[in-house]
Amino acid sequence: MRQVASEEVDVRSLEHALRKTIEGEVRFSPGDRALYSATGANYRQLPIGVVIPRTVDDVIATVTACRDHGAPLLSRGGGTGLAGQTTNVAVVIDFSKYLNRVLEIDAERKLARVEPGLILDHLRHAAEQEHQLTFGPDPSTHEYCTLGGMIASNSCGVRSVMAQFYGPGPRSSDNVHELDILLYDGRRLQVREGTSGDPEIDRRLTELRDRYADRIRARYPDIPRRVSGYNLDDLLPEKGLNVARALAGTESTCVTILGATVHLLHSPPVRSLLVLGYGSAADAGDHVMDVLEHKPLGLEGVDETLITDMTMLGRHNEDLSLLPDGRGWLLVEFGGETKDEADEKARKLMAELKKKGRDAPSGMKLYDDPPSEQHVWQVRESGLGATAFIPGKPDTYEGWEDSAVPPERVGQYLRDLGKLAGKYGYESALYGHYGQGCIHARWNFDLKTAEGIRKYRSFVDEAADLVLSHGGSISGEHGDGQSRAELLPKMFGPELVEGFREFKSIWDPDWKMNPGKVVDPYGITENLRLGTDFAPARVKTHFSFSKDHGSFGHATTRCVGIGKCRRTEGGVMCPSYMVTREEKHTTRGRAHILWEMLNGEELELWRDKEVFEALDLCLSCKGCTHDCPVNVDLPTLKAEFLSHYYERRLRPRTAYAFGLIDQAARLASKVPALVNFVTQTRPFDAVAKAAMGVSQKRHIPPFASPTLTDWFTRRPERDGAGGRRVILWADTFTNYFHAKIGAAAVEALEDAGYYVVIPQCAGHLCCGRPLYDYGMLDLARRYAEKVIDHLRDDIRAGTPVVGIEPSCVAVFKDEFPKLLTLDEDAERLAKQAFHLSEFLAQEGYEPPPLPGKALLHGHCHHKATGGISPEKKLLERMGLEVEELDSGCCGMAGGWGYEPDHYEVSMACGERVLLPKVREASPETLVVADGFSCRSQIEQGGTGRGAMHLAEVIKLAREQGSIPPYPGRALSAPSRKNGRVRAAAALLGASALATAAFAYRSK
Ligand SMILES: Cc1cc2nc3c(=O)[nH]c(=O)nc-3n(C[C@H](O)[C@H](O)[C@H](O)COP(=O)(O)OP(=O)(O)OC[C@H]3O[C@@H](n4cnc5c(N)ncnc54)[C@H](O)[C@@H]3O)c2cc1C
Ligand code: SF4
Ligand code: SF4
C-alpha cells in the first residue's frame, strides 16, 4: 500500500504526457532527480522526476498526468524540511521558482493571500514595509523557506511567542485562514473554518471528528508546540471544524496547496534584546515562566556547549564574549513603538528578576547596539546547521532535534534528556525555543554501522517516552515526516493513529500523496542517506580535504541541506542561484549532485555531463566557504572535479586563454602596443575574442606598458630607502594590466614606512589563480611549489607578503595550504599573506585625508579571506563617507564572465546590486573595488564609470587631496581603425591557438 516504486509507473509515458501538457519545466534526467533526492534530513530517495510549474494550471495538469499514470506526488518549497517529509519516490512539484508571489495584502483584515512557493521573508518585508504587519511564526530558515512548506510542516519560530501572545497562535496552522487546495483526484477546493467546500467531505470529516472527539481531547497535549500528528483537534466543535488548520501540517500526504490566505499581526517596529545568564541551561529553563509573564515577543535558550561550539567554529567570538555571566542563557525580545517603550519592558523584567534573591539570574544584559543584537540572534539561528561539523568532534545529525514539552517543564526535561543522552554516549548543545518548550539538538549518532543505527533507533524510542512523560510532543516544529512518524502510536495511541489513516483516506483514497510519510510510515532507519551500505567511491585527489578527514566524499556530505544558499539577497552565497533561482545552481544542489556522483547509482564518476553542467555556473566566488554555516567549499570541489573531468580531454579554448593568462600576458607584454592595437581595435578585437573563446559582448582589457615589475626595476634608487621589509606580490592582473595600481601600492607601503620588495625571477612567478578556476591542478601545484621555493627564505624570516589583487591573496591564504599539505611553508605563507588594506590597517597606517563619498564593493574572495571591514575603516579614517555595498559577487569572476555561455548570468549578477548602484552614484563619488574582475565588470557594465583600487585612492589623497569628477572613469571602448594591421590580428589569433595547443600538449 505504502510505496509505489518508480518501476511500477510508466515513467517515459508520464514524462511525455507532462511535456505535452505543461508550460513549465519537466525534468526527469538522472542529474535532475539527484538534485531532489535529499534535504537536511537523514534520508535519501530518488524522485521519479521533477516538475517546475509556471502556473496553477500547470500544477493541475501535473496532478492529472500523475493520476493517469498512478504516480505518487510530493510538493516542495525550499526543501529545508528536517524530518524526511520532502523526499520520496514520487513526482516532485517544485513551487519555489515561479509560484512565489504575494497576491494581496488586506491590511484592514490583517490577511495576506500568497502563492505556496513564496519565501517567508518576502511576505514579511512586503507586509512590514507597507503596513507594519508580519507573519508570526518565523523558522530560522525564514530567508528561503516557503509558505507552502511552512504550512504543510506546521512550522514555528522565535516569534511564535509573539504570535501566541499577540496573534492567532504560535504555529503556522494557527495562522492559516483559508487554503486553496487540489486533491489527487483533481478536485480543487477552498477550505476554511466550518467547511471544506465539499459537502460530502464535510460530512465525512464531521463523522470522523465525532467518533474520535473524546480521544482527541484526552490525548492531544495542550502545549504551544504540539506539531506531531494531524491537527484533528482543529476539527472539534469548539474549534469550529477548521478544515484549513486541520490540513496544515499534513506534509503533502493529503493535498497539494495551491494558495493560502494567512493571518498577519502587528509588528512592533522597535525591538530590544535582553540576555539573562544562569548557572546552567537547565537553570535557565527553570525560569522560563518568570519571563513569559511579561509577554515578550521571543524567548530563546542557549547553552554553554552551543557557545563553545560556535567559538570553535570561529563564528561571532567577539560578540559572544559580551554575553552576561552564566553557563546557560535566556534571550528575551521585547517590542514597542519606540526604543524607550521596548527597553522599559525589559527593564521592568530585570527589576523583578533582581528581587528573586538566589533565583535571580547571575548576569543580565540589555543590549543597546543593533549589530551586537543581530549577532547574538545569528548565533542562535545558525545553531541547528552550523553545529553539524565541529572541528575535533564527531559529525552530528538531526533525528531528535525538535521535541517539545510544556514550558514549565523545560528545566527538568533538559536535565533528563542530558542524562538519557549520556547513557548512550551522545552529546549535543541543547538550545532552542525554551519559551515554548521546544528543544533543539544535533546528536553524534553513528548512522553508518548496524550497531550505530540500532543504538540511534533505541535512543529515539527512549527519548520519545521521556518527552511524553513530561506531557510533551515528539515534534515541536519540524514535523513527523519519516524521522518521527513511526513513534506516533506512542504519543497518540493506536486508535488515533487509525484516525489519522482515515483522515488521509478522505483526501487521498488512492494513497498517492507522499506515501510512507506521517501515516503508515517507512521505518525511522529506512532510506537513510548514509546507512550500512554507504560506500562512496574512494577517489585520489589533488587537494588534501584535511577538514574532511582527507575525503572528497565527506566534503560533499558536508552540505547538511540548511538551504542558506537559496537566499535571494544579502551576502555573497550563492550568486548563480540568486539570478537563476534553480536548485541546480545552489551550493546545495552542487554538493548534492557531487555526492550522488560518488554514490554511483545514477551518475558517472568524474565524467558526467550533468554534474559538469551543475558546476559550470559556479563562479568559484568562495561565497559558500564563508557564508555557508558549515563552510561547504564548492570552489575546491569544482576545481577537483574539473581536473578529473578533463583528464585526457581537450579543454575549451577559454580554459587555455584564461587559465594560462599569465603566460599569454608575459608574451604580450613584449609587444604591448601591437597587442593593444589588435585587441582594442575593431574588427580585429572580434577575431582575437573569437580565437580566445571570449564573448563578443566583452572587451579584452588593454595591456599596461611598462609592466609593474619593469617600472619597479627601472625606477631610480630611493634616497635613504629603509624600513621593515615587505614583499609586494605583483600578480598577473596588476603587473600586466593595471600596473599603475601596483605602483600606487608600492608608494602607499613606502609612505607607511616599509621597504618594498617585488619578487621576480628569471622565468615567471604567478600564484596560478586562474588555473584553479579551470581545474588545471597539476600545473597549479607546479606554480605553487615555484612560488613557495622562491619566497621560502622570506616566509621563514616572517616577511609579510602583501597582495594587491584579492583573488591572488586568497590563493596564498586558502588554496596553497589545501594543495601543498606537506609543505609547512605553505601554511606559514597563509598566515603572513595580507590584503593591502588588511596589512595597512593592522599596522596602524594613518592614511592621508580625502573628504567626500565612496561606494565600496568588496571582492568576494576578499570577503571570504579576512573581510573588507579593515578597508572600510581605512577609507573612513581618510574622511570618506563610505557606503559598503551588499553586492555579493560582481559576476565577472576572473575569466568566467568573459565566456559566451556565462555572459548573461554574469551580467545578471552584476545587475543585482553593483551596477545599478554605480550608475546611481554622483560624479564625485569614488567607486572603490580592489578586484580586477570587479573593476572590469563595472567598466564593461554600461555604468560609464571606472572603479579605483584602495592604493589609487590613497595616491589621489596624497597627490590631490580632493576628488575630481568621475574619478576612475571607464576606459573607452575599442575604436574603429582601418585594416592595415590584419596581420597583427592573425598573429594574436595564432598566438592564442598556439597557447591552446601548448597547454594541451603539456597535459
Ligand atoms: C537549519 C535549519 C533550521 C530550521 N529551523 C526551523 C525553525 O526554526 N522552525 C521551524 O519550524 N522549522 C525549522 N526548520 C525546518 C524547515 O525549515 C521548516 O519546516 C520550513 O518551514 C520548511 O519550508 P520549505 O519551504 O523548505 O519546505 P519543504 O522542505 O520544501 O517542504 C516541507 C513539507 O511541506 C510540503 N509542502 C511544500 N510545499 C507544499 C505545497 N504547496 N503543498 C503541499 N505540501 C507542500 C513538502 O512536501 C514537505 O512535506 C529548519 C530547518 C533547517 C535545515
Ligand atoms: S551548501 Fe551550506 S548553506 Fe547550502 S544547503 Fe548546504 S549546508 Fe546549507
Ligand atoms: S563558489 Fe560561489 S557560485 Fe560557487 S557554489 Fe559557492 S557561492 Fe555559489
Image (cartoon, grey):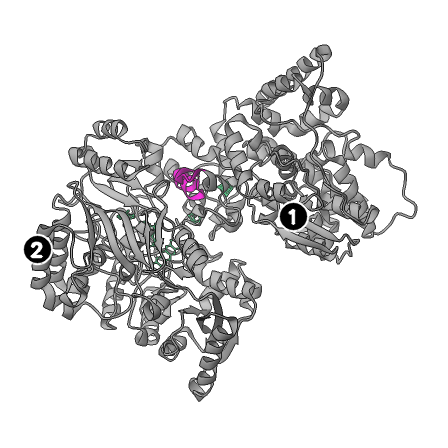
Mark 1 sits on what residue?
855
Q: Residue furthest right?
A: 719
Look at the image and tell me in which quarter the C terminus lies. top right
Magenta stretch: give its range.
580-594
Residue drawn at x 27%, y 53% is 152
**Amino acid found under the numbered disc labelled 2:** Arg
Q: Position of residue 402 (x, y in %)?
A: 32, 62
Check disc 1 and give the amino acid type. Leu
Q: Is residue 371 above or below residue 853?
A: below
Residue at the extreme front: 108
Left or right of 798 in this view: 149: left
Q: Residues within 10 Å of mark 1 (few under 14, many from 20)?
A: many
Q: Is residue 928 magenta?
A: no
- Left of 657 or right of it: where is 15? left
- Is any atom of residue 759 visible in this view? no
Which residue is label 2 attached to? 203
Judged by its main secondary structure, the magenta piece is helix
Residue 88 located left or right of residue 984: left
Residue 44 lies, in percent from the top left, at: 30, 44
x, y percentage for residue 625?
A: 52, 47
Residue 431 in the image: state x and y as whole percent. 40, 66
